[in-house]
Amino acid sequence: MGFLIFHTMKISYNWLKQYIDIPESAEEIGKVLTDTGLEVESVEPFETIKGGLKGLVIGEVLTCSKHPNADKLSVTTVNVGERVLPIVCGAANVAAGQKVVVALPGTTVHPAKGEPFTIKATKIRGEVSEGMICAEDEIGLGESHAGIMVLDTPVANGTPAAEFFNVQTDYVLEIGLTPNRADAASHIGVARDIKAAKKRSLTVPGIDAFKIENNNLAIAVEVENTAACPRYSAVTISGITVQESPGWLKNRLKSIGLSPVNNIVDITNFVLHETGQPLHAFDADLVTGKKVIVKTLPAGTKFKTLDDKERTLTTNDLMICNTEEPMCIAGVFGGIKSGISEKTKNIFLESACFSADYIRKTGMHHQLKTDASFRFERGTDPNLTVYALKRAALLIREIAGGAISSEVVDIYPVKIENKLISVQDKHITRLIGKAVPREEVFAILENLEITIVQQEAEVFTVSVPPYRVDVIQETDVIEEILRIYGFNNIELTETAGTDYLAEFPEKDSNKFKRALSSQLVANGFYEILTNSLTNIAYQQKHNLAFGGNPVEMLNKLSEEQGILRQTMLFTGLEVCAYNINRKQKDLKLFEFGKIYWKNEAGDEVTKRYSEEERIALYMSGNTETENWQNQTKGVTYYDLAQQVVQLLEKVNLENLKQEKLNDPLFEYGMQLLKGNKEIGKLGKVKTSLTKDFGIKQEIFYADLNAALLFRSANPKFVVQEVPKFPEVRRDLSLVLDKRVTFDEIRTLVLSTEKKLVKEIIAFDVYEGDKIPAGKKAYALGFTLLDESKTLTDEEIEKVMARLMGAFEGKMGAVIRK
């Protein structure tokens, strides 16, 4: 069995909006992308400064005097807008007249290092302090703790610090990218899918401003191995200044989890994540011989990479070399000698298309995985190299200065042409399972930049650009149509199948029954088979009415077999009575069978009569045979409920709703619903009914709609990694109104804390004179787990505090401590 390896890719919501109009929220656009096949695993908020500087304002120090009880402290009064606060400050540089950043009482501050902490109004050495005058490291704006921040600004006191420092809020979409979707490994690539799904226009940054300013820094390029490097583009830029990147660029990279380095490296990373085209910048003054050669080197050649590790090359490793030595492992990792530093003034900028096979083998051999190699391994767009090169060059000129100082080198000996694929209309209908109008098919393909080049009556030909490395045959084109048309727009039939892609067996109801039967038998049940004919007197005696009218036999053999059954219960009780009368009192029985009824409306022969497949479970007596090891225990409702839950888990039926049962067949019980459809019901059979059969012990009975279970069955295996971090158990005892069910408790728990609570159990329930009348005591066990880290005691206590608050606030619970 093979498994798809998913790569988590981060996409900035604000960055995405630069290329396409997105009125939807981040969560809504996440659903759109998931529907197109780019599964958004999470949508997380991102702030350019952690905590967003919430609760911090700009203030003015009005007075500053020495603390009467501490030599190194000062007592100040600070105007924060609508009020003046007394604040004790320990900074040596605090003085009256300064504009400062103030954390108000109740504010949670996020320092550059260490855990967040909350500011409280307090007394420090006897003096009242209602806030904190902040240093830059205390609020995550820098690393310095030399003193408080002193601002040179005329802004009004009380101005939010978030506004003053232009804190920006973004959302990050984490996409589980499958290996075939290399085209979506960038913001523009993701925007292309939104364009197709929402039928909107896409805007990419222009490069018309690119121009050659001089030819003072010409560097020749030679590609010896064109199979490993089908296209190589480059340009030089002279007179640049390497420095810190501007805020907008750093924020873009931070939002997707990258650490800014310097303006040149940051621009190459920005263009990579914008377009999907990796770039590499070399210090041009370190290119010996003013020539770049793309080639492989003899096996055993030593090369030191940027991480200061010496690596031994193979004959498969494609290298970017100067006339004397290698400078970079092509498409994977740079060398330690030719990288960009603060001293760099001139650069050689590379934008190439490397062979996926070469890069994959090199990355595996050297155990190197980079953003660049990730894209090259899957296949990049050979027609994008020059655009990305010019885009990066324009950004470098704008941010780092300098002049474009050479012609664009573009070595592309054999152009990679678009793929021509013929598609038949009947195959689209056959594989999708629905006839999609041709006009809609063409619109979808054109929006995906797959061009229609020829049309005939029942077939057409498309031209697929090289960057769509996953679209190589007719079925791939049809898959593209389907994912944009929408899987949710295809009606599901009772059986699923396909003609070409795979062969799926039709859903077999007999196999389904055997699977459920095997599980019940393994749990100690015996299968019974009863007559579909029953006695109408059973229901007449108790004035029972079922859906529709009973179907009477025209040639009945006796009154005891006068009608077709409308419930499985009566024939099952006959079997229970037969066994109990013969001293077989511990019963676990099940039966697959049909119930029947007649409708008044409809055709006389066909529409008037209906039948439905059911599965019935019966439990009575003790849970197990009397033995010397265990004390015998009588069957309860919960033993039956456990069996029903296991059956529902077998068919993978989730999100069921439980409601208290009001049914004349049951003393008490529960009804199971999927949406508005009843899946089944279970509970204790009414004593008045069991007495009619001479049964003196309790009978617990479940009646499930087997036909609906069969149609809804979706058995599947879920394979997931064993958690690396330990789970934690916490118990809680609470007293609630006795009408509150455990299902209501579980629903409240999961709505309050769904992420960390993995399981909830009730290990004890008490009703009695030790608690108030009308109340019930639950002892609950909670299993907590964070799959990304070990939970701290503080985090655990916060979760339990939220749960206790929810129980008290929404259920009126009393927590027993």
Image (cartoon, rainbow, N blue to C red):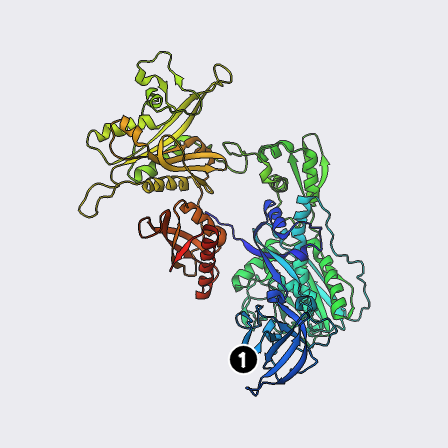
- Mark 1, other Cα within 10 Å: few <14 / some 14–19 / many ≥20: some
- Against 597, residue 464 (above or below) is below
Picture coordinates of residue 217, whole percent (x, y): 77, 70
* Frontmost residue, 532 versus 264: 532
Residue lying farthest to the bottom in this orientation: 71
Provide the secondary structure element on which disc 1 rests: strand
* Frontmost residue, 724 versus 767: 767
Q: Residue at x 64, y 66 (%)?
A: 320
Q: Is residue 275 visible?
A: no
* Frontmost residue, 397 versus 635: 635
Q: Is residue 760 visible?
A: yes
Picture coordinates of residue 686, whole percent (x, y): 32, 32
Picture quadrant of residue 251: bottom right
Residue lying farthest to the left in this orientation: 628
The amino acid type of the residue labelled 1 equals: Ile
Q: Residue at x 19, y 29 (%)?
A: 582
Residue lying farthest to the front in this orientation: 773
Picture quadrant of residue 101: bottom right
* Frontmost residue, 626 versus 352: 626
Q: Relative to residue 531, is residue 89 drawn left or right?
A: right
Picture coordinates of residue 107, whole percent (x, y): 58, 68
Q: Relative to residue 730, is residue 18 drawn left or right?
A: right
Q: Quadrant of the C terminus?
A: bottom left
- Against 384, residue 342 (above or below) is below
Q: Which residue is mark 1?
A: 124
- Against 245, residue 208 (above or below) is above
Picture coordinates of residue 99, whole percent (x, y): 69, 76
Picture quadrant of residue 701: top left
Tell how many labels. Answer: 1
Q: Relative to residue 240, is residue 805 drawn left or right?
A: left
Q: Relative to residue 488, is residue 511 drawn left or right?
A: left
